Structures are given as C-alpha cells and as structure tokens.
Image (cartoon, rainbow, N blue to C red):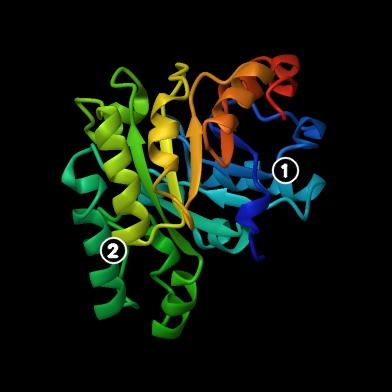
Amino acid sequence: MDLNWDRLSHVTKIDPAEHVPNDLELLDGTDLVIVGGSDGVTAENTLDAVQKVKSQFPDLPVLQEPYRSSHVSSKTVDTVDYLSVPAVFNGDDAHFVRKHVELFTEAASKPDEVTGSGLPVVGDAISSKAREAVSELATKIIGEGYVIQNCDSKAAAVSGVETPYTTEEVAGAALAAESFYGFPIFYIEYSGTYGGPTDVAAASQYLDETTLLYGGGIETHEQTAEILDAGADAVVVGDCFHDAPEQYRQTIP
C-alpha cells in the first residue's frame, strides 16, 4: 500500500498488550494506525490487533512499530503495510545505531541464518527467507527519527533516554532527520504528558519532505488544533483510545 503522507492529520497508536475493542468503529476518522508497545507485547497479540483493524478497515494503513525482535513474525510482516523502525536521537546507541547495523549486517551476510537474537526488528521473520526475500522485506522498513521528551515514560526507560532535548536540539534533530538521514518520519514523543507546541514549531521549520508527528497527552480537539497549527502533520493519540473512547473522539480534527 502506498501511504500518502500528505493526507495525515490524525494517527492512532494501539498497544496490543492493552484491551483492543472488537468493534473498532472508533477508528472511523483516523488516518493511520501504529501498533506497538513495550510491556506485554508479543508477535501474537500484535498480529491479533492488526487483523482486527484490517478486518474492519481494510484500506486504513497500519504500521508496526516494534521495540524487540520477538514482537515481529513473518505473519505480522505480511499483514502490516510497513515496519516503522525508531531511531531515538536522545537515547542510547543501541536504539539509534548499534542494533540497526547488526540487523542489516546479518541480513546481508547470512540471510538464511538470521534468527533475530538481539536484533531490533525482524526476528524470526528473516530466518526462513533467502536473500531476495530479505531485499523485499527491506522495502517495507521505514526509518523513524524519534525524540523522547518525557524521561519518566516507559519509552524513555526502554530507549535509555535520561535527558530531554532543548528546543534547539529538537530543531537540530529534525534537520538531521530530513537532510542527513532521510527519514520519512520525525516523531516528537511526550508519552502521556502534553508538551505543547514549542518543540513542534521549532522542528517544523526544518521539515519539507519528512512527516512530523507529535504524540503525548492529546485529549481534546483544542490540543489537536494547537499542535497542528504549530506545524505538525499529524497528532498521535494512544492512551485515550484504550481508556476513554468518547475523549478519543474529541481528538480527531
């Protein structure tokens, strides 16, 4: 599926370890679904969440954003439209460089033997594939530049983030994401708290081709509008999708 980044304004993030309603009519109005989480996530519950979305909204794009190789299987790869691989600018090196290099080194040098041990994304999905299949899989992988600004969040703990970026550093990371790394996504993540428009405005001035996502604490239509007005292409809403459906509806522009 070709994803039209220009048409995004609202993204729903589904944690497959949380309750996913059988009736997902809530998603009518969102433009993209990202499935991912840290605690309690498996390839099986990820696949279940993706299949629920696809069964009711077959034309709604779905990305998988895995934190560990065990979250991915050949079935999840086949079912999702893309694998979104985070590169956390203010995290430890394992979440920006080292594991990504391990992934592509092993995939390129011994595609029939890769088992996924220690790899950030693909896991057992590669183990039964020949080099041609690995190359095809790579077309589904997209890089996602990440800045995590809530150091008390699970995302920060998983990624080794100890210090949030200054506004100037957020702008620099955005410039690097587009101009140097060529990432199609730059994601400012406040993870459960509302960070406001300042970082978004700073980042957006350097992004022409890269899609700017903001996630964290979005609970009202006014917050959505404030973030979009500051220059974000889309807001990412997760917690209230699971916990407060009526509130979630208020976040859709």
- Which quadrant is home to the N terminus? bottom right
The local secondary structure at tag 1 comes to: helix
Q: Residue 203 at x, y = what percent? A: 39, 39
Tell me if residue 48 comes above or below residue 215 in the rendering: below
Q: Residue at x 58, y 23 (%)?
A: 226
- State the image coordinates of residue 193 (x, y, percent, origin top left): 45, 16
Q: Which residue is mark 2?
A: 103
The amino acid type of the residue labelled 1 equals Lys
Count of numbered circles in the view = 2
Identify the amino acid type marked 2: Leu
Comparing 129 with 81, the one in front is 81
* Quadrant of residue 127 within the rendered picture: bottom left
Label 2: how many residues lie within 10 Å, few (<14), some (14-19) or many (20+)?
A: some
Say whether disc 2 or disc 1 marks the residue closer to the N-terminus: 1
Residue pictured at 33% horizontal, 59% vertical: 179
Can the viewer see residue 129?
no
* Residue position marked by numbered label 1 in the rendering: 52
Seen at 30% across and 29% down, the residue is 167
Judge left or right: residue 16 versus residue 249: left
Residue 24 in the image: x percent, y percent?
77, 34
CA–CA distance in space, label 2 to label 1? 29 Å
